[in-house]
Image: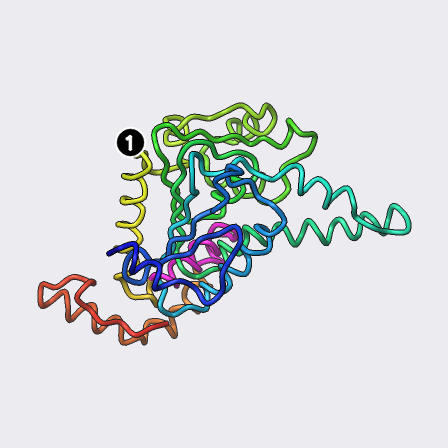
Amino acid sequence: MAAEAAERRSPGRSFETLRVTQERDRVLHVELHRPEKRNAMNVAFWREMVECFQDIARDSSCHAVVVSGAGKIFTAGIDLVEMGSVFMGVEGEDVARKAWNLRQKLREYQETFSVLEKCPKPVIVAVHGACIGAGVDLISACDIRYCTQDAWFQVKEVDIGLAADVGTLQRLPKIVGSQSLVNELAFTARKMMAPEAQSCGLVSRVFPDKATLLEGALDVAAAVAARSPVAVQGTKVNLLYSRDHPVPESLRYMATWNMSMLQTDDILKSVQAAMEKKGPEDVAFSKL
């Protein structure tokens, strides 16, 4: 029955590389869905992730998102065969023009994962098996990261002759507590297993297998989705702002944000529910 309900609540558009379903109330599940290719990221994927999360950002019925991978692993990273031809075939009459066009292309691909941050709904990523190369770029842009005990992570780009260019080098140092560790991972492309990923802060929970991982991620997403969307989305916006700005500036931004958001009816509804010994799940918050 749950699977049937999930199929009934699917997005307005279909995707080649993603499968989007509703697994819980106000929770969408976005699944990387090229299992026969180990969820390698082809040209369609880079476009569809942007389209998918722009749709989700506008979907007032969605309050939280879980991202996972179909098949045996989370993702093998970029599809080297298909993507290699894209970057090798950049046109231009001279070096400067080729470089300009290549920069534009790279900025487009950076948006594929930046869109996860820009989406105001919290994004929980559930990693099983391998998370290689661009997979690390993807999870670094998510709000909460969980994995299975057999998961492993690899900043693979130096092994194919390039520096990671779609988010890992910018976001991972702000996630992991050790700059030395980030440098080691990026310089050597060594694998980092789940226990180390948890100890350094890349993931916050480790589950025994994929089934319990997805169940745990969906449970947390449902708990998030039950809270006031004004409160949750405002919290995400300000957490990201604070990450990238000094404390005094972030406090000023927070004050400006809440000078309007504190006037929401959600506060009155939440306080009333608490006084009546009810939880957020019992409150009918308006859509946002």
- Please indicate, yes or no, whether residue 271 appears anywhere in the rendered image: yes
Q: From this viewpoint, is residue 173 visible?
A: no
Asked which secondary structure carries label 1, the reply is loop
Tell which of 4 and 230 is nearer to you: 4
Q: In the image, is 86 to the left or to the right of 238?
A: right
Left or right: residue 164 versus residue 236 is right
Question: Label 1 amino acid?
Answer: Pro
Quadrant where the N terminus sits is bottom left
Which residue does the image show at 66% across and 35% down from the upper left?
A: 163
Does residue 171 belong to the magenta stretch? no
For the point 74% across and 50% down, which residue is it?
Answer: 103
x%, y% of residue 25? 28, 61
* Percent coordinates x, y for residue 265 in the rendering: 27, 76
What quarter of the picture does the C terminus occupy? bottom left
Q: Residue at x 41, y 38 (%)?
A: 127
Closer to the camera, 158 or 80? 80
266, above or below 166, in the image = below
Which residue has dot 1 on it?
A: 208
What span is colored magenta in the figure? 232-250
Please tell me whether residue 246 belongs to the stretch shown in magenta: yes
Tell me the residue at 30%/74% (across/down): 286
Coloring basis for residues: rainbow
Q: Residue furthest left?
A: 276
